[in-house]
Amino acid sequence: MKKFTLHEITTLALMLSMIFVLSALEGMFPPLPFHMRFGLSNVVTMYALFFIGGRAAFTLAGLKSLSVLLMRGPVAGLLSLSGGVLSLLMIALLAAVCRNASYFLLSVAGAITHNMGQLAVASWLTSTNLLALFPVMILAGILAGSLTAALLRVVMPFFKRAAAPNRPGPP
């Protein structure tokens, strides 16, 4: 397995810090029904997937889940990991199959898949059939995915500018 270079590690560290900041900001919002969240930090993992590569995106998802595990416990960590990994798999698969898929479509599909992964794990952990939440989770995925896609579109120029190689510095 290829090791990350120092530049890649630094980039991942900065991106992970962005994930933490966005998660903290999101935690300041008033609570949503069913403890749902918008998933603002998914903007960073989507950017990583599209412009850095799958290895970086899955590493970020794993590190994010590890931090959730350490801060909120094993159940939250497992829910984060299942949702994050399934979401990235769906986005990567759709992007590979539909080369011209919009960020909107990819983001909504990823958010819905994220919710379905968490719902499946929650059902397994509680030994309860939570299928009744399926329509609510799809609607939440559409809303969260739409917001994430809109945010990604807004921040994309800043990400591209920050990642531009060999930018000339000030004179």
Image (spheres, rainbow, N blue to C red):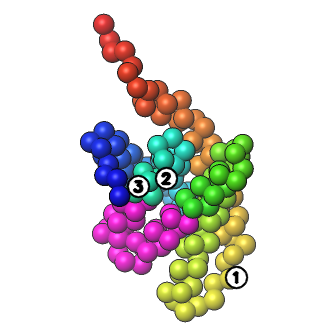
* Residue 55: image location, x then y, percent: 44, 53
The prevailing secondary structure element of the residues shown in magenta is helix
The kind of residue on which mark 2 rests is Gly
Q: Which residue range is magenta in the image?
A: 60-87
Does 134 appear in magenta?
Answer: no
Q: Nearer the viewer, residue 52 or 35?
A: 52
Q: Residues within 10 Å of mark 1 (few under 14, many from 20)?
A: few
Which mark is first along the chain, 1 or 3? 3
Pointer 1: what residue?
A: 132
* Residue 42: image location, x then y, percent: 51, 53
Q: Quadrant of the N terminus?
A: bottom left
Residue 125, relative to residue 79: is it above or below? below
Q: Mark 1 and 2 residues: CB-CB less than 8 Å, in contact?
A: no
Does 84 appear in magenta?
Answer: yes
Residue at the image position 51 percent from the left and 49 percent from the top: 49
Which mark is first along the chain, 3 or 2? 2
Res. 143 in view: no
Q: Mark 2 and 3 residues: CB-CB less than 8 Å, in contact?
A: no
Residue at the image position 53 percent from the left and 29 percent from the top: 157
Q: Nearer the viewer, residue 140 or 162?
A: 162
Which mark is first along the chain, 2 or 1? 2
Pointer 3: what residue?
A: 60
Number of numbered labels in the structure image? 3
